C-alpha cells in the first residue's frame, strides 16, 4: 500500500521522498525514497545511528527542507506555508531559546511573529507554561535555566501554538539520563493532553521504548521489517 492511499486524514505523508545534497560524483544521498505517514494520535520513535538520515527526514516532514525526489504533503493541514506556527511544531536538540528574552517572551515569540498581539501571545505562553508546571520560571532568562528546564520550555513553546503534530529531533541528546526522561515524560504528557501526534528521533533505545511505535533508519532508509504504521506502511526504496 502506498502512502497516498487512504491518507486523507494523515497529518504528513511522505511518498517516495528522498533528499540528495550536492550533485555529480560528490553528491550525498541522505534519504532514499521513504514512504510513510503519520496520523492523528500516533507516537513514533524514529531510531538509528548518527548519520542515518533521521534529522533530514524530520526536517522534510516539518517543511524546513524540500525533497529532491518524491513528495511530502500535509493532507489534514494544508500547504507547506500553513505549517507554522501552530499545526506543526519542531523541538530541536540544541539550545533554541533566545538569550535576551525571558521564558515567557521566548514562548510567546513565534505567536507574535505569526501576527498575534502581544497580550494574546503572552496569555497563551502563560497557559502553555502552566500546563507543564513551568510558570514559576516565566521571568527567568535562558542562562538561568538548567538544560532540562530549557528543553521543557521549548516543549511549552511548541504547545503554545496548539500543534497537531510535534516533531522532536534528539530532544534528550545533550541531557543526562534522568533529565532526559523528564523531558520525554513532558512531551508524552503534552501529546496526551493536546491530542497531538508525536515523532521523536533518537539513537537511545530507552527513549524509544516510551513511544508506541518504532521506525528504524539505516543509511537513509526506513528498515522494512520494523513496526508498521497502523493502516499503512513505512517503507523505503533505495
Image: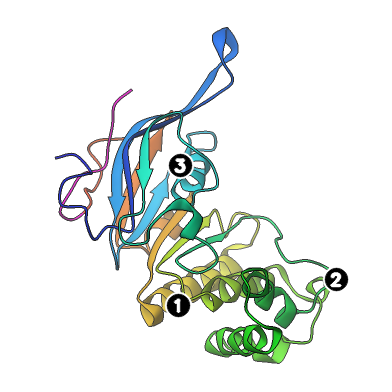
Based on the displayed image, in which of its 4 quarters is residue 148 positioned? bottom right
Q: Position of residue 191 (x, y in %)?
A: 40, 74
Mark 3 neighbour class, 10 Å CA radius: few under 14, some 14 to 19, many 20 or more: many
**Residue 118: numbered disc:** none
**Image quadrant assignment for residue 10:** bottom left
Write the residue at 55% across / 66% down.
Answer: 85
Left or right: residue 4 versus residue 25 is left
Q: 129 left or right of 99?
A: left
Residue 179 within the segment the image draws in magenta: no
Q: What is the chief secondary structure element of the magenta stretch?
A: loop
Q: Position of residue 157 (x, y in %)?
A: 60, 73
**Most distant residue in the right direction:** 100
Which residue is label 2 attached to?
100
Q: Earlier in the sequence, mark 1 or mark 2?
A: 2
Nearer the camera: disc 1 or disc 2: 2
Q: Residues within 10 Å of mark 2 (few under 14, many from 20)?
A: few
Dots 2, 3 in contact, CB < 8 A: no
- Measure the alpha-carbon separation of dots 1 and 2: 27 Å
Position of residue 170 in the picture relative to residue 199 (left or right): right
Q: In terms of secondary structure, where does tag 2 sit? A: loop
Dot 1 falls on a residue whose secondary structure is helix
**Residue at mark 3:** 57
Q: Where residue 209 sits in the image (x, y, percent)?
A: 37, 60
The residue stretch that appears in magenta: 230-238
In the picture, the quarter occupied by the C terminus is top left
Residue at numbered disc 1: 190
Amino acid at each position: 500500500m502506498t502512502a497516498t492511499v487512504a491518507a486523507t486524514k494523515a497529518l504528513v505523508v511522505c511518498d517516495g521522498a528522498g533528499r540528495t545534497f550536492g550533485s555529480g560524483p560528490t553528491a550525498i544521498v541522505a534519504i532514499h525514497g521513504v514512504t510513510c505517514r503519520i496520523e492523528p494520535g500516533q507516537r513514533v520513535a524514529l531510531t538509528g545511528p548518527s548519520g542515518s538520515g533521521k534529522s533530514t527526514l524530520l526536517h522534510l516532514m516539518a517543511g524546513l527542507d524540500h525533497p529532491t525526489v518524491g513528495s511530502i504533503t500535509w493532507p489534514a493541514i494544508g500547504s507547506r506555508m500553513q505549517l507554522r506556527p501552530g499545526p506543526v511544531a519542531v523541538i530541536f536538540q540544541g539550545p533554541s531559546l533566545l538569550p535576551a528574552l525571558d521564558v515567557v517572551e521566548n514562548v510567546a515569540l513565534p505567536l507574535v511573529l505569526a501576527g498575534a498581539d502581544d497580550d494574546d501571545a503572552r496569555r497563551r505562553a502563560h497557559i502553555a507554561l502552566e500546563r507543564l508546571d513551568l510558570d514559576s520560571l516565566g521571568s527567568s532568562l535562558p542562562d538561568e535555566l538548567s538544560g532540562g528546564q530549557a528543553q521543557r520550555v521549548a516543549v511549552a513553546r511548541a504547545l503554545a501554538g496548539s500543534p497537531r503534530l510535534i516533531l522532536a529531533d534528539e530532544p534528550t541528546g545533550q541531557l543526562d539520563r534522568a533529565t532526559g526522561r523528564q523531558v520525554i515524560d513532558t512531551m508524552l504528557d503534552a501529546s496526551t493532553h493536546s491530542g497531538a501526534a508525536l515523532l521523536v528521533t533518537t539513537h537511545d533505545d530507552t527513549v524509544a521504548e516510551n513511544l508506541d511505535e518504532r521506525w528504524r533508519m539505516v543509511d537513509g532508509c526506513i528498515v522494512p521489517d520494523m513496526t508498521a504504521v497502523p493502516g499503512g506502511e513505512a517503507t523505503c526504496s533505495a
